[in-house]
Amino acid sequence: MTAGSPRYVLYKNDFPDDLTFGDVLAIDSEFMGLNVWRDRLCLLQVYDGVDGKTHMVQFDRGNFDAPNVKKLLSDPKKEKIFYFARGDMRWIGHYLGIILENVYCLKIASRIARTYTQQHELQDVSHHVLGVKISKEQQCTDWGAPDLSHAQLDYACNDVVYLHAMKEKLNAMMVNEGRLDIAYGLFKCLPHVVRADLAGWGNEDLFGYHVPRP
């Protein structure tokens, strides 16, 4: 089943067999809360900029087979752009069983490129880098509802449609400061970090140095 608008197409539980995407995917997800083991994955948004639409899959509770979604996300040749990759990768890893490769994280890129500020949330980056104001009003709504509202789906679109442009701007800033290699080195670590998160080390500073108490 699908539903759509000029901005998006919504599918139930998987992409159709004949749907194709470009090589650079802007991706986001919505879930019930902030505990990956308790708060299920509800919606996955993918935007490649090719047909101008965001393609979204709404998952029913317990229905995460989604072979076409898994095939797309498992393709190492496709670059996946996220705002906060580590967060979305946890839910995708836990519910879809995929540890994503070839990932770009805008939050890491912003922190490497924009050291003159501590404002690195999505709405801050989009506003200061692109001049686009993104509303987060629908963020804390019921994403597990059987029927998502138009306001929720428009919000979900806005979370991905600007990511390509933000990546381009942040990369140019990092090139100018000689920092691009630092960011891409950190991106390569993300699959291993997410594996550690899902195995139970998510709240530990594994890179910190702690002197043992006598």
Image (tube, helix red, strand yellow):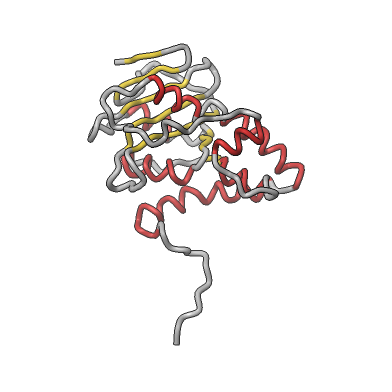
Please count the marks in the image. Answer: 0
Q: Is residue 66 left or right of residue 184?
A: left
Is the residue 205 above or below the residue 3 in the image? below
Q: Residue at x 70, y 49 (%)?
A: 116
Between 16 and 62, the one nearer to me in the picture: 62
Question: Where's residue 108, x and y in %?
Answer: 58, 46
Question: Where's residue 203, x and y in %?
Answer: 41, 59
Q: Quadrant of residue 120?
A: top right
Question: Where's residue 85, x and y in %?
Answer: 49, 42
Q: Residue at x 35, y 56 (%)?
A: 199
Q: Residue furthest right?
A: 176
Q: Quadrant of the C terminus?
A: bottom left
Is the residue 213 above or below the residue 29 in the image? below
Q: Quadrant of the N terminus?
A: top left
Q: Is residue 77 left or right of residue 145?
A: right
Q: Residue at x 27, y 28 (%)?
A: 145
Q: Residue at x 37, y 42 (%)?
A: 91
